[in-house]
Image (cartoon, rainbow, N blue to C red):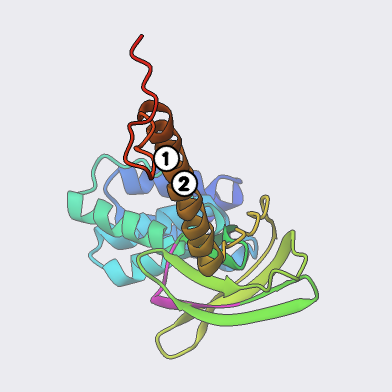
């Protein structure tokens, strides 16, 4: 290291000086100072990581810069990078490194589809890193349910059959996000409270229903016939008697 750079580092602001060198379009010297500081300080200051990554990027060492940005964003995912001299392609590399460094988080929920079936939903946020499926285990009501659900976009779903005799108001869900070959990428764990369970629907015996309608229909027919007969009896004159004489007809 050049004596001037060493003295600047000893003065207590090596990364500030390294940044000024980078802004003064001296990426080689900025990289040298940042590397020296990172080699001496086990805490690996974020400011020096940022200067090192930017210097590597400007020097055309994109893949090296990507690795340093990955370390930087893994420790500070929302760190603001301010460098107006960077090209659009450089910004794309920086944001890609940021996205790839975000921790993979899972949001787990469950709801009743009907009295005997649950739907389990697992949504992922962060860098997928080649994730293809979720291997899960749900425990509740004295029972355990296991499965593997493929990822569609960032979501995995499963339907769990639960006997209506099983009392279940919560689930403990654990598992892992896996790649195509089964390698684990991330683990997940969540306690899920279930909403109100739908009440079972009481089925009506179709044969009983048919019989009810049949007997009801017959009663209606009989009642209608009786009414008609009464109406005829009340509105008709007395029939002739067996002796051939006319019965009494009241003409008033």
Between 216 and 170, the one nearer to me in the picture: 216
| Residue 115 visible within the image | yes
Residue 203, image quadrant: bottom right
Is 66 placed left or right of 213 in the picture? Answer: left
State the residue position of label 1: 229
Q: Main secondary structure of the magenta part?
A: strand
Q: Position of residue 118 (x, y in %)?
A: 58, 65
Asked if residue 92 lies in the magenta stretch, the reply is no
Along the line of sight, which residue is nearer the eye, 160 or 74?
Answer: 160
* Label 1 or label 2, whichever comes before in sequence order: 2
> Residues under labels 1 and 2: Cα distance?
14 Å
Tell me residue 140's x, y (percent). 75, 70
* Contact (Cβ within 8 Å) of mark 1 with mark 2: no
Q: Residue at x 61, y 68 (%)?
A: 116
Look at 37% across and 61% down and name the residue there: 97
User: How far across and how far down the image is residue 139, in percent?
Assistant: 72, 73
Could you tell whether 24 is left or right of 80 in the image? Answer: left
Question: Is 155 left, or right, of 141 in this rendering?
Answer: left
Tell me what residue is drawn at x 41 percent, y 31 percent. Answer: 231
Image quarter hosting the C terminus: top left
């Amino acid at each position: 290291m050049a004596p001037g750079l060493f003295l600047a580092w000893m003065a207590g602001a090596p990364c500030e000086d390294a940044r000024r060198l980078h802004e003064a379009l001296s990426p080689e010297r900025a990289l040298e100072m940042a590397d020296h500081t990172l080699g001496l300080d086990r805490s690996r200051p974020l400011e020096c990581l940022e200067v090192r990554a930017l210097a590597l990027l400007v020097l055309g060492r994109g893949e090296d810069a990507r690795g340093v940005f990955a370390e930087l964003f893994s420790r500070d995912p929302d760190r603001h990078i301010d460098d107006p001299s960077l090209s659009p392609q450089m910004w794309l590399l920086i944001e890609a490194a940021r996205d790839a460094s975000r921790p993979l988080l899972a949001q787990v929920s469950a709801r009743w589809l009907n009295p005997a079936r649950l739907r389990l939903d697992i949504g992922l946020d962060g860098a997928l890193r080649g994730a293809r499926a979720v291997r899960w285990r749900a425990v509740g009501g004295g029972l355990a349910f296991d499965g593997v659900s493929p990822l569609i976009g960032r979501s995995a779903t499963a339907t769990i059959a639960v006997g209506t005799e099983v009392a279940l108001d919560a689930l403990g869900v654990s598992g892992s996000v896996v790649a195509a070959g089964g390698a684990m990428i991330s683990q997940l764990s969540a306690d899920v409270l279930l909403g109100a369970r739908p009440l079972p629907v009481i089925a009506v015996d179709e044969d009983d229903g048919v019989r009810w309608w049949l007997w009801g229909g017959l009663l209606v027919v009989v009642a209608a016939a009786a009414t008609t007969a009464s109406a005829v009896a009340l509105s008709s004159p007395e029939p002739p008697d067996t002796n051939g004489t006319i019965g009494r007809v009241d003409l008033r």
